[in-house]
Image (cartoon, rainbow, N blue to C red):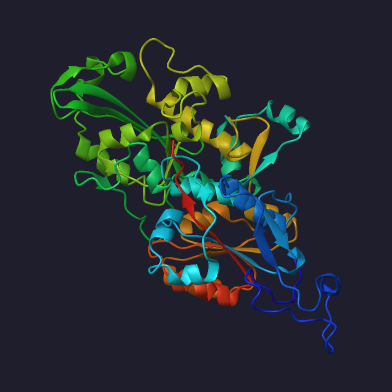
Amino acid sequence: MASPPTGKSDTNGSSAPSNPNDGAQTCNNAAYFDVSGPDGTADVTFKSPDSKAVYLQDIQGLVTWVLGDGLMPSWIFVKNKPLIQKVVLLHLPGLDADLYLSNPNLFSGLRKCFGAPKQVLALSCVADEMQTIGALLTYRVKRKHEEIESNQQFHCPTSAREKALLLENQKDLPFPVNYYTHSRRELEDSGYCINHPEFVTTVPAPVGTSPHRILALDCEMCITAKGFELTRVTLVDGCGEVVLDKLVKPFNSILDYNTRYSGITEEMLNGVTTMLKDIQEEFLKLVYKETILVGHSLENDLSAMKISHQLIIDSAILYKNPCSEGHKTALRVLSEKFLSRQIQASGKGHDSVEDARAALELVLLKFKYGPQFGTHPFIGRKKLVSVLHESGSTCSLVDNLFIVKRYSDGSCNAIPVSSDDEALSRTMKEDWIHITRCKQRIQGSLAVELLKQFRCVLVVASRLRKI
């Protein structure tokens, strides 16, 4: 623990710490009480004027300052910091400062405990829950010069054996594979159709089977009287080996084979009898709900296949365009830059096998070198729970399964929950530092109950930045 294991305090100063000099009780934090006095309590005071902006990184900095080896924040003063034994970081999605202030009766419990909140600026003018969670639960670290030099000489796993070893030894990866899968919000913002009535949805794998953990997909399309239609489907496994590669006959008459991009010609489709429904059936026997599907701008491929799947790693989303946030970097550009390999350069159109393998290898590079690979060379990211663990603190992460898998590590007490009530119940049973957030319903009584259980409760209420 980064703070003493005994003594009671809260941000309101309503309860006094036990004095280790009274009776037979002894502990290793006696020096703290000598400085603070027997009636000492922890408290916080805002130092900056209301006009000065506070950001999500400032909230995270406060947590690392109180519990770890972070820098002392300039916007707030923490009185008697050693007396703080536990911290709850409670994120309430959908509750911003303006909503809180304009509904005093609805949030009477929160107001009673915390009063007027300190407004925190969001990362952008568009509400993005996952961006907020990522900013709070991952920690920016500067890498040493020698680390930067060594990372410039990165090695991409190209052979089947190298890829297999990388996926087998996941405990050695900087972040778990599931960290890179995208949230529903991210997918929808990128054009994915999650619940389209005309789409077929992937299903759970049958009991007793071992579905593919990762498959990379790439499709080719032609132009028909009804728009783009599917002409080729390719799936490769995590080792880059082809598991499905079939031509598909469009249902409508073809107006343009789109050969310059698709590589599909009239001769190639002569005699092809596989229709969309046939390829969907084959696809669903390989790709189950638990399978991670990798590719580049897969929203187009899945739309052409009329298939809905939510466990996605899209290299077009992972490798953000440094020049324009609204535009995606082409696969051929990423391949040449990070794989040192030219693709789509034959002059005969794209090769879906080649493209699927390129997208897979780009994702494997992220697995191997971490989520910051391919971005600013001097900045890396670590999980907040890992940073606090290095400082001697033990963390619990209470959230839905997706968040828990993405942001916990071996040192963290990971507690997946499925509802607010369960989150509250499990959190109150814990006796460590808690990083928790509750979805769906916002109840003032929830924060009151947390305050009764823990000495220091920090509520984050974000508002959108006006531009």
* Quadrant assignment for the C terminus: top left
Residue 14, quarter of the rendered image: bottom right
Q: Nearer the viewer, residue 448 or 67?
A: 448
In the rendered image, residue 287, in percent from the top left (x then y), is placed at 36, 45
Q: Nearer the viewer, residue 137 or 100?
A: 100
- Quadrant of the frame with the N terminus: bottom right
Residue found farthest to the bottom: 23
Vertical position of residue 438 compared to residue 12: above or below: above
When asked about the image quadrant of residue 267, the answer is: top left
Question: How many marks can you see?
Answer: 0
Q: x and y percent of residue 65 in the render?
A: 71, 55
Is residue 7 placed above or below 237 in the rendered structure? below
Which residue is drawn at the image coordinates 19% and 44% (left, top)?
A: 198
| Residue 254 shows up from this direction | yes
Looking at this view, is 51 or 217 the one in front?
51
Residue at 65% in and 72% down: 10
Percent position (x, y) of residue 62? 66, 54
Residue 152 picture location, percent across and down = 68, 26
Identify the residue at horizontal 51%, vertical 36% (top origin). Answer: 239
Asked if one can make out residue 176 in the rendered structure from this viewpoint, the answer is no
